[in-house]
């Protein structure tokens, strides 16, 4: 690695790797400094049984053109998430099957859920995902949590269960923690709540053959030695238009830095001089979601034979949602999402108890065949010191309306990438690429000026 | 410093020093590891002109029995904050004088403010400061911000100005960021909002001759070499009932650790194994207040001759409140608080512009004599990497009702002190001592068991 480069990128997640790729293509020298012993950040694939599975981000949906192009550029293939058959909904212990996107609930429950979702849709359509803080009601919406706004109209258990499962899975957070302004902006930038919770035709439609981590790893390979692993950045010191980036293995000099790590990790880097107060506020004010992925492999996808898609929505711990997560025909699997507060409660159980609880719940949902587990794998993102949570960090109430304009703004020679700074599909791989595109363009413009 | 001790205390603020003092008195060996090159944390005194001034915490109020005892044990003296004469209130550019605690506003404004304050008082009296999460409406209150609850009833500028100044000064935060549940619990534990904003008879009544930092420094001297400075702790590794505390100057082995740093700094320490998810959530979910103290010294306290106390409340930037901050007869001074979002905006100005703006505002409030500045000193706590803000960290909406029970709970061999974990006077020196008392008692009980 060069000790002097044009641009240092902090973080070798998809966004950092994509920004570095663009800068290198433009003829600049780059160094990517990564704290972990691997690239990929929230993309993390692992061989389990006969398949390869994503313990982090894994899905691509229609309309996500940047990631589709990225997949194609890397000569990777996608395959559809299995979606045949009926889905399950479990409310207060009662299990039903349904088709389509909205769980089968009682008529009054369905009415209530429809009303709530329509209200959310009406609200987010009036709001710009890019600059929600400019909305005339920004202060009032940001001073409200999703719970405060939506809770009172979700009085029936089934409607409440479906809403909570969606919020927890999309954000990794509880409704009472989420700013209503951010919630609406996030939905607006992601094509709406129904898009974000749908499989076919929605954000869970397709997966990457061989695992999504390749989206970062193959691109990193093309950066020919520019990525340094196990090199967490501790300080960025600016003196006389030069930046010195201090990491655990040494220092790199640069003319520009792109920070491509989640906000709470960016906050841990000591910037000298300090970042502007408004920037620090949006970084400190972002809460990482709580997500534990539980992958259970089976000899065969027995639920399919019973006409089930494998998809389930539930109000019973530990899983808010479950998906058929087969790696094509190579390995049958179910994937459960333990998200929001239930993730913290699940995490407090001893490991053997967690497995017992998880498998028992799969048996309740899919029948006793679910007990014939091949492999059981958990990944708790909140325990990862170099991510701190998944899927995404959300600005807490009040933050976006006060200092949202600092969210993605460049601070002199320091720019910001990462899916949290995306204007579209924040929280998704598409957003990671969109943010990288913007951050790389800012760097190029700054260095040419 | 010993390389093996009974207890390592992380952080040499008042709470850490007090915990270490108690443990040493009980016969245990202790090491206090401090990131800065000084002890005191949020207590930081500095000689300016002929006086010594506190750029951090400085006030002690009636009913704070632990800190009164601590002052006495260290043979320190207190003196009253100057409180003679009339106070100023400035709303939308109009300046009035008043006496007592409630600013002089128009009758309808006063009525509105009284109603709002009475409502807050009624609510916080029903709530336990120690366990607010057990309140029957905890979820609903925690899903609301102070803005959402109080904003609609504060429609008149004067009432709004007085309320905002109080909230910003007490928390360093905006009403739209603060959980209503935490707001009420904080007031409940601090004797009510009127107590927290009052000088004589309230939380700003008395100061320490020679500066409040001595409260930590003199006690640290008595720990005879147990305090190591410039030793930020990076990792705490537990193996076989022994803890290894890794800092920038080496390692210390211990049987027990007390974390006595603000929540956001505790989050930056890598614990191996990780802290429980609920504990991580309350640490990550705490927002440090934004406070810049602006101290301006004068040859004489010219405002007193005009019958003014020096105290002012204002809705105009930069100061929410101003106090007469004379160091007895030794040095006249005014102290302005730039707090909440106005602190971020003030911080974005160039230094010379900040001084111009601040002095111009003092001239507007106290007359043109305020232009004859001797020394001008600012201290922006948000820029301090080993504090990150002042006066206190507040749990963001949703956090306290979800995981408040983890706020001060011991995690095996790891205990928690610091004013944020106090059951009484959270955010004050009294709270720092109360938390230290509890954390030391927990350590002793654990190590004796």
Image (cartoon, coloured by chain):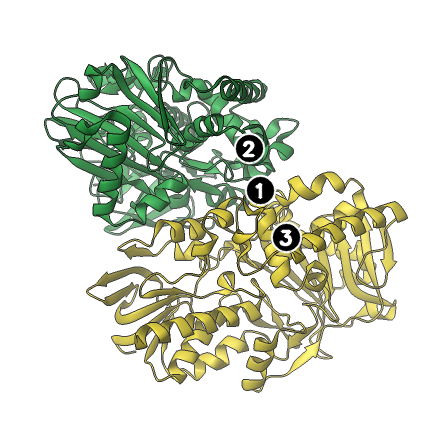
Chain colours: A yellow, B green
**Disc 2: which residue:** B151
- The residue at which mark 3 appears reads as A339
Chain letter of the residue beneath label 2 in the structure image: B
C-alpha distance separating marks 1 and 3: 27 Å
Q: Are marks 2 and 3 on the same chain?
A: no
Badge 1: residue crowd in 10 Å (few <14, some 14–19, many ≥20): some
In the foreground, A24 or B359: B359
Is residue A127 placed above or below B15 in the rendered structure? below
Q: Residue at x 44, y 20 (%)?
A: B105
Q: Secondary structure at mark 3?
A: strand
- Observer-side mark, 1 or 3, equals 1
Asked whether the residues under marks 1 and 2 belong to the same chain, the reply is: no
The image quadrant of residue B401 is top right
Label 3, residues with CA under 10 Å away: few <14, some 14-19, many ≥20: many
C-alpha span from label 1 to label 2: 9 Å
Image spot of residue B54 (x, y percent): 23, 30
| Disc 1 target residue | A140
Residue B179: name its quadrant. top right
Above or below, B335 against A75 in this view is above
Nearer to me, A265 or A412? A412
**In front here: A374 or A216?**
A216
């Amino acid at each position: 690695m060069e000790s002097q480069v044009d641009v240092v990128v902090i973080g070798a997640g998809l966004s950092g790797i994509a920004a570095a790729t663009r800068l290198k293509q433009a003829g600049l020298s780059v160094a990517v400094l990564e704290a972990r012993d691997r690239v990929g950040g929230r993309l993390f694939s692992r061989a389990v049984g006969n398949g390869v599975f994503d313990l982090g981000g894994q899905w691509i949906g229609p309309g996500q053109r940047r990631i589709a192009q990225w997949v194609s550029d890397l000569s990777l293939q996608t395959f559809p998430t299995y979606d045949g058959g009926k889905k399950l909904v479990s409310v207060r212990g009662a299990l039903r099957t349904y088709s389509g996107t909205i769980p089968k609930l009682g008529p009054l429950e369905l009415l209530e859920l429809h009303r709530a979702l329509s209200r959310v849709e009406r609200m987010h359509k009036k709001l710009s995902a890019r600059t929600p803080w400019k909305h005339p009601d920004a202060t009032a919406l940001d001073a409200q949590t999703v719970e405060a706004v939506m809770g009172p109209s979700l009085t029936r258990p089934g409607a409440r269960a479906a809403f909570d499962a969606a919020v927890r899975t999309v954000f990794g957070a509880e409704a009472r923690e989420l700013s209503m302004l951010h919630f609406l902006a996030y939905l607006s930038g992601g094509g709406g709540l129904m898009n974000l919770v749908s499989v076919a035709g929605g954000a869970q439609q397709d997966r990457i053959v061989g695992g999504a981590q390749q989206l970062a790893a193959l691109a990193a390979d093309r950066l020919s030695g520019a990525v340094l692993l196990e090199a967490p950045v501790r300080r960025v010191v600016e003196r006389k238009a030069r930046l010195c980036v201090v990491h655990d293995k040494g220092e790199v000099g640069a003319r520009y830095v792109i920070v491509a790590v989640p906000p709470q990790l960016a906050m841990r880097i000591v910037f000298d001089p300090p970042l502007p107060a408004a920037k620090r506020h949006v970084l400190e004010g972002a809460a990482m979601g709580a997500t534990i992925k539980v992958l259970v492999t089976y000899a065969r996808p027995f639920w399919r034979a019973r006409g089930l898609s494998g998809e389930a929505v539930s109000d019973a711990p530990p899983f808010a949602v479950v998906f058929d997560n087969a790696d094509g025909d190579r390995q049958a699997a179910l994937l459960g999402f333990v998200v929001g507060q239930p993730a913290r409660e699940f995490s407090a159980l001893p490991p053997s108890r967690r497995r017992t609880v998880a498998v028992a719940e799969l048996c309740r949902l899919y029948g006793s065949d679910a007990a014939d587990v091949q492999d059981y794998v958990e990944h708790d993102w909140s325990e990862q010191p170099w991510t701190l949570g998944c899927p995404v960090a959300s600005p807490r109430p009040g933050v976006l309306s006060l200092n949202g304009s600092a969210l993605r703004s460049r601070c002199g020679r320091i720019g910001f990438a990462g899916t949290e700074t995306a204007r579209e599909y924040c929280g998704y791989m598409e957003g990671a690429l969109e943010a990288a595109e913007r951050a790389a363009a800012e760097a190029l413009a700054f260095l040419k000026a």
